Structures are given as C-alpha cells and as structure tokens.
Image (tube, grey):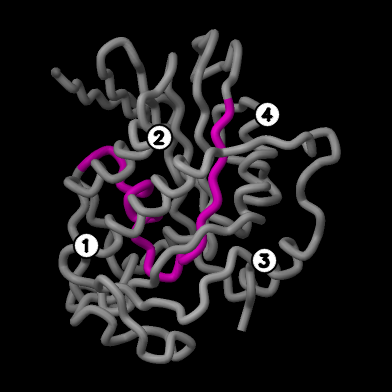
C-alpha cells in the first residue's frame, strides 16, 4: 500500500495530505505563540467556568478504545524523543479538556477554536474523509512531522531557541512532545458538508485534541534534553516510568499546585 505525502500552502496555512486507500486525512496547523506570564492564572479561571455551550450539552462519546489509543500513542511518542528528555511528563486523560473538544468538534469548523479557549489551551486537529479503521489514522500525521524537526541544543538557545523545522510545519509534533503538556482530552465527531479550505466534504471524521498546559511557545524548546527523569518537577517526587516523570496518583480532573 502506497502512502502519498503532499504539502500545500494556502494563505499562511499548511495543508498536509495523507492519502491511504480511498481516505483523505488532513491536519490543521497549530500556532507558535509568545509566552505570557499571566497564562496559567487565566487558564485556571477559564477552566473553573462552564465553557461548554448549553446547545452542545447532549452527550457525545469518544470510545474507550479510541481514548486509550490516543493517550497511549502520545505517551509512546513522548517516551521515545531524541535527544532524550530530562523533564518529559507522563500524559493523562482529562475529561474537562475532552468536553471542550466535544463542543468544538460539534461545530464542524475546520479551524482552531473557539478563540476564547485558544488563549489558554493547545489544540491539534485532524479530519478524514470516509470511515477510519483506527483512531491512529487521524493522529499519525502529527507524529510524522517529527522527521522534519531538529531539537535545538542548549548552545543554540542563547537567549532564545531557534525553530528548527525543515518541513512546512512541525507544530503538531512539538505539541505532542511538549514536556509540560501533561493532560489531553479529545473528541471525534462525524460532520456532513464540512468546509475544508474551500472544498465541501460531505461526510468526514473530525478529531479535536486539546492540551494543557499549552505548548509551542516561541523561543522555547519542547523539553529539556538530558538523562530521562533527571529534571522532573518536584511535584513528581522522583517517580519515573518509561523515560517520563510519572505521577503517584492519576486523576482525570485538572488540578493546579
């Protein structure tokens, strides 16, 4: 089976096309942002509010199988980074992030959003025409960007780290491996007549994954290089598993120290 990779640029957005059999998979770009010291308090306030519109509160599901598939794949990618990460945190599922992803996925809008949420949380998007065999069909293109990404070594980060991406975009991958982005929540929604950069797709599968904390800050590397778990945040108490800082208690609720 042949996999075709194509890159197109439209008004500053990058279109990744992965054609596999009769299916078409697209990944939307993620932003590189300037770090804001007020971001975490603002995020805390935002997540304490009811961010899911009332009109979107009918119950939707991402299957347990898909949820575990996304989560385990992210942690596998995070554990295998090169050079090794000294502060890579184990990623856990967060129901609040999943609910916000559900609300946005239901809008069937091929763009990041809602704007009020994007100030605080990272987001990767993917869509595929027709049915998918595995949820990883929608996620793998993010990981594949890693082949074009070169980690900026400390000697290059003076005073800021360069963005070393030899391809059109690497920001889906860097969000996946952003060390402090230790929570994820995703939603899958089937959309009819979804407008994807000017083309109407009659039936598509739309994946939205939200991350906390937000990654992809301009001038910062996604993680610290070094011996695995040698620079974990103190809250982990020195616990390490599979090259990642591992929490003693895993919870699906957001908490802030």
Foreground label between 3 and 1: 1
- Residue picked out by circle 4: 107
Q: Quadrant of residue 109?
A: top right
At horizontal 52% and vertical 28% (from top left) the residue drawn is 206
Percent position (x, y) of residue 107?
A: 68, 28
Mark 4 to mark 1: distance in Å?
Answer: 34 Å
Q: Secondary structure at mark 3?
A: helix
Foreground label between 2 and 3: 2
Please give left or right for residue 222 compared with residue 98 in the image. Answer: left
Is residue 92 a member of the stretch shown in magenta? no
Pick the front one: 182 or 217: 182
First in sequence: mark 4 vs mark 2: 4
Question: How would you rate the neighbour count of disc 2 (Cα within 10 Å): few for under 14, some for 14-19, many for 20 or more?
Answer: some
Q: Secondary structure at mark 2?
A: loop
First in sequence: mark 3 vs mark 4: 3
Mark 2 to mark 3: distance in Å?
Answer: 28 Å
Percent position (x, y) of residue 182?
A: 46, 66
Percent position (x, y) of residue 154?
A: 21, 77
Mark 1 to mark 2: distance in Å?
Answer: 22 Å
At horizontal 31% and vertical 42% (from top left) the residue drawn is 169
Pick the front one: 230 or 26: 230
Foreground label between 4 and 2: 2
Please give left or right for residue 114 compared with residue 156 in the image. Answer: right
- Residue picked out by circle 3: 43
Q: Which mark is residue 81?
A: 1
Mark 3 to mark 1: distance in Å?
Answer: 28 Å
- Residue picked out by circle 2: 135
Question: How would you rate the neighbour count of disc 4 (Cα within 10 Å): few for under 14, some for 14-19, many for 20 or more?
Answer: some
Is there CB contact under 8 Å for labels 4 and 1?
Answer: no
């Amino acid at each position: 089976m042949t996999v075709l990779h194509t890159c197109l640029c439209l008004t500053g957005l990058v279109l990744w096309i992965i054609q596999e059999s009769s299916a078409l998979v697209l990944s939307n770009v993620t932003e590189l942002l300037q770090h804001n010291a007020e971001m975490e308090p603002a995020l805390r306030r935002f997540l304490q509010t009811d961010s899911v519109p009332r009109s979107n509160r009918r119950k939707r599901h991402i299957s347990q199988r898909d949820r575990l598939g996304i989560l385990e794949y992210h942690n596998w990618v995070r554990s295998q980074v090169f050079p090794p990460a000294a502060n890579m945190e184990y990623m856990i599922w967060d129901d609040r992030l999943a609910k916000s992803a559900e609300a946005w996925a239901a809008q069937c809008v091929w763009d990041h959003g809602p704007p009020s949420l994007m100030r605080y949380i990272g987001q990767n998007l993917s869509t595929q025409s027709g049915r998918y065999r595995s949820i990883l069909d929608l996620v793998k293109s993010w990981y594949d960007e890693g082949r074009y990404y070169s980690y900026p070594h400390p000697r290059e980060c003076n005073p800021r780290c360069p963005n070393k991406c030899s391809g059109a975009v690497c920001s889906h991958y860097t969000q996946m491996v952003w060390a402090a982005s230790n929570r994820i929540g995703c939603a899958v929604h089937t959309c009819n007549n979804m407008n994807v950069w000017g083309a109407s797709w009659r039936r598509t599968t739309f994946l939205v994954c939200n991350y906390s904390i937000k990654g992809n800050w301009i001038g910062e590397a996604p993680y610290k290089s070094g011996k695995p778990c040698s620079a974990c945040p103190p809250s982990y108490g020195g616990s390490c598993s599979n090259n990642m800082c591992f929490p003693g208690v895993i919870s699906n609720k957001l908490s802030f120290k």
